[in-house]
Image (spheres, grey):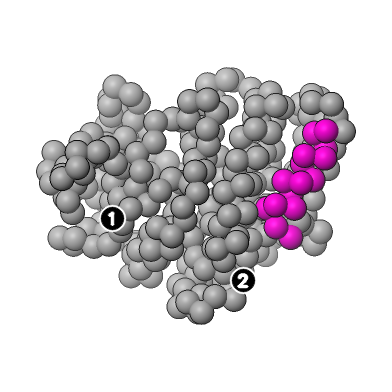
């Protein structure tokens, strides 16, 4: 996913035009940015803390309680369809049911004054991309394992609620003080196929956009059928990124051949980082296998525990 810019602690924002954005994108951003300082859907919007391709996130506070929250507002982009807007709201609806310490808590979402928004827990931390970039290389094996364990615990919980996340990648994993992990970005959350309300989302899944650097092949080629195994793939790709300081795959696929996602190959982790135990490499390989992938996040977590124990880490 293309991110236009993150805003640092000081709130200094670069000019969008300097970053190669189009006039339409800049205009859409400026319309959302103008909401800063206003009361919006029961929240007082403060400074912008993140500007992404399709949305802007404000630090805000509850107008009644005064507690800090984050409010994500969808940009009024011309290429966003009604399906995209509805998916955004449905993702918020399903995410609001996820009550786990490793998920950012979603309070509410909807449409107000023509704007689509989600209000969620405000979290102090950095996403994994920033953490790895700041380090200038791979994370240590113990640090990476501690982070991915929490990701898998969150995904297992979601699986038990019949929910698939579909956006497990480093920029959606926030690392807080004490290596506490929070998964965020709920735009693609949906119920698993067996749930009664799953059929509602089927017609909306043909146009979803995912990051081919980390996404499971079926999530790229056949998103309607993607289940919890897509999240397992994302967890494996995220672990790979932490241990190798690079994504397992490239950022582009042939536009007319989405099925080529099944032909992607990744470099052996130990070739990039000899510190990675062979057993952990095996877990990563199976988590990103097309045909032998783990059946649940919990199963992957168990295999990872065994691999770590065998390595003496």
Is 307 contained in the magenta span? yes
Position of residue 247 relative to residue 207, above or below, is: above
* Secondary structure beneath label 1: strand
Q: Residue 301 appears at what percent x and percent y?
A: 72, 46
Crowding around mark 1 (Cα neighbors within 10 Å: few <14, some 14 to 19, many 20+) is many
Left or right: residue 54 compared with residue 273? left
Does residue 205 appear anywhere in the picture? yes
Residue 38 location in percent, x, y?
12, 43
Marks 2 and 1, how far apart at CA: 27 Å
Which numbered marker is on residue 117? 1
Residue drawn at x 50%, y 49% as measured from the top left? 100
Q: Is residue 249 left or right of residue 36?
A: right
Residue occupying image coordinates x 70% and y 57%? 296
- Residue located at (65% from left, 32% from top): 146
Viewport quadrant of the C terminus: top right
Locate residue 257: give its quadrant.
Answer: bottom right
Q: Contact (CB < 8 A) between labels 2 and 1?
A: no
Q: Nearer the viewer, residue 290 or 21?
A: 290
In the picture, measured across the screen, residue 303 lies left or right of residue 190, that is right
Residue 166 can be seen, yes or no: no
Residue 69 quadrant? top left
Q: Position of residue 210 (x, y in %)?
A: 53, 55
In the image, 41: left or right of 249? left
The image's mark for residue 184 is none
For the residue pair 101 and 27, the one nearer the viewer reads as: 101
Q: Tell me: residue 33, above or below residue 270.
A: below
Please tell me which of labels 2 and 1 falls first in the chain.
1
Give me the residue at 55% from left, 40% from top: 170
- 28 in magenta: no
The residue that label 2 is drawn on is 225
Residue 106 at x, y percent in the picture = 37, 52
- Magenta residue span: 295-309
């Amino acid at each position: 996913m293309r991110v236009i810019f993150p805003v640092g602690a000081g709130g200094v924002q670069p000019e969008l035009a300097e970053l190669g954005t189009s006039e339409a994108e800049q205009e859409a951003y400026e319309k959302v940015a103008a909401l800063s300082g206003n009361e919006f859907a029961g929240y007082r919007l403060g400074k912008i803390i993140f500007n992404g391709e399709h949305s802007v996130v404000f630090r805000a506070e509850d107008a009644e309680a005064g507690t800090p929250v984050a409010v994500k507002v969808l940009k009024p982009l011309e290429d966003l369809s009604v399906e995209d807007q509805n998916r955004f709201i449905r993702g918020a609806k399903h995410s609001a049911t996820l009550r786990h310490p490793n998920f950012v808590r979603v309070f509410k979402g909807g449409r107000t004054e023509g704007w689509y928004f989600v209000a969620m827990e405000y979290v102090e931390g950095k996403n994994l991309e920033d953490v790895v970039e700041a380090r200038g290389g791979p994370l240590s094996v113990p640090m990476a394992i501690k982070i991915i364990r929490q990701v898998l615990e969150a995904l297992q919980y979601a699986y038990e609620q019949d929910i698939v996340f579909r956006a497990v990648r480093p920029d959606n994993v926030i690392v807080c003080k004490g290596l506490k992990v929070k998964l965020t970005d709920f735009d693609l959350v949906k119920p698993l196929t067996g749930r009664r309300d799953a059929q509602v989302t089927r017609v909306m899944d043909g146009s979803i956009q995912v990051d081919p650097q980390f996404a499971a092949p079926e999530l790229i080629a056949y998103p309607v059928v993607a289940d919890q195994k897509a999240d397992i793939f994302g967890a494996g790709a995220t672990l790979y990124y932490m241990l190798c300081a690079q994504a397992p795959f490239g950022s582009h696929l042939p536009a007319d051949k989405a099925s080529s996602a099944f032909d992607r190959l990744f470099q052996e982790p130990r070739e990039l980082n000899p510190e990675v135990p062979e057993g952990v490499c095996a877990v990563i390989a199976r988590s990103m296998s097309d045909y032998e992938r783990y059946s649940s996040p919990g199963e992957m977590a168990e295999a990872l525990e065994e691999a770590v124990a065998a390595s003496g880490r």
